[in-house]
Image (spheres, helix red, strand yellow):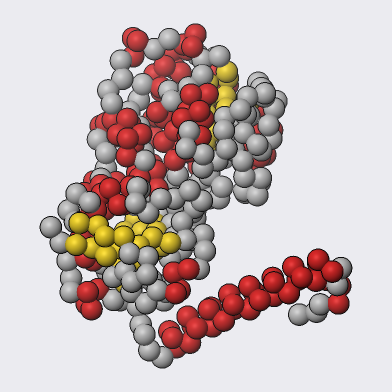
Amino acid sequence: MKTLKLWFTDFYPGFEPQDNFLTQLLSKSYIVELDENNPDYLIYSCHGHEFLNYSCVRIFYTGENLKPDFNLCDYAIGFDYIHFNNRYLRFPNFAFYEGQFQQLIISKNPGSFDLSAKKHFCNFIYANSFADPTRDNFFHLLNQYKKVASPGKHLNNISMDIGERYAKDWMFTKIEFQSSCKFSIAFENTSSPGYTTEKLLHAFITGTIPIYWGNPEVTKDFNPKAFINYHDFESFEDVVDKVKEIDNDDEMFLSMLNEPPFRNNIIPENLNTDTLLNFLQNIFEQKKEDAFQRSFYGTAVKYENDIKEMILFRKKYRRITDYADLFGLRRFIKY
């Protein structure tokens, strides 16, 4: 097998270069050699700027609602519906949770579901208080009908520890609690075409009915009969009325619950891991010098150098203000 000299940078806290979905996927076809100092290929994300220190082939991956900057990367993997030759692949982050993702196509047995196991009406599990206010507004509106259990850090109203975000067991404690609910508020941080995260995935695999807001084109990926899609309604009040109707009709609830998340219970081809692997192989199977797509001349060089200078200035300014804070001199600093 071909050897890939690879490194990862600017990912979320706790990310492990030697043990993640991409490393595991690539290890099926390549000998992956992790080289922090001199990689041939760099896969980077949006939580820093270390990638600017690498001159190798750069592949941008984002699990956040951010657009790729193709002036800085050669290739990108993200949420947006972008067509840019062979340089971009839409592969939403929920498909990276492979073990959970595969659960979406496990056949359900309608007669085996115990409705009495649903101890809570609905859940709202979030730590981020800086999301689009739409999410909080809907929580408060639905809470007027019945209590929505919120065990997370944000708008917490129930004494229960579901763990810290990014802790190794966080996702499993969250899912365990979510399974005790009839409905899940599965709202994204922001609304943008293509931007669907694990929030909808978790609502499905825990046997809840998702109440979804975020990607207005979400039904390109998922079965519209399997969830309550805000984007099908005129107002939040209409959404709440729909939730009430389903909540008070067990037959309707079970009918929706037993709809497969995907149409015909088949994972769409664009969300298949083979699609991701083929995209990456098209990069790695070229001659290394041919894999570069970003420009190294003209305005592109100035653009990248300007960004580097701004980052250095910000670091320098932060050090100055830290010292000023220490000695009570912050008020004398003007930039």
Figure quadrant of the C terminus:
bottom right
Q: Is residue 233 left or right of residue 136?
A: left
Provide residue 262's location: percent of width, then percent of height: 31, 35
Residue at 54%, 83% in the rendered image:
306
Can see residue 216?
Answer: no
Total tally of numbered discs in the picture: 0
Provide residue 98's location: percent of width, then percent of height: 32, 39
Q: Is residue 159 left or right of residue 163?
A: right
Q: Is residue 326 above or below residue 56?
A: above
Using the image as rendered, state which of residue 157 and residue 4 is in the foreground. 4
Using the image as rendered, state which of residue 210 and residue 75 is in the foreground. 75
Q: Is residue 55 above or below residue 19?
A: below
Q: Is residue 321 above or below residue 171?
A: below
Using the image as rendered, state which of residue 271 and residue 290 is in the foreground. 290
Residue at 28%, 70% in the rendered image:
40
Residue at 32%, 35% in the rendered image:
99
Figure quadrant of the N terminus:
bottom left
Provide residue 202's location: percent of width, then percent of height: 44, 33
Residue at 44%, 50% in the rendered image:
15
Provide residue 288's location: percent of width, then percent of height: 22, 74
Can see residue 49?
Answer: yes
Q: Is residue 331 left or right of residue 117?
A: right
Q: Which residue is situated farthest in the bottom direction here? A: 298
The answer to which quarter of the image holds residue 137 is top right
The answer to which quarter of the image holds residue 280 is bottom left
The answer to which quarter of the image holds residue 68 is bottom left
Q: Which residue is situated farthest in the left direction here? A: 1
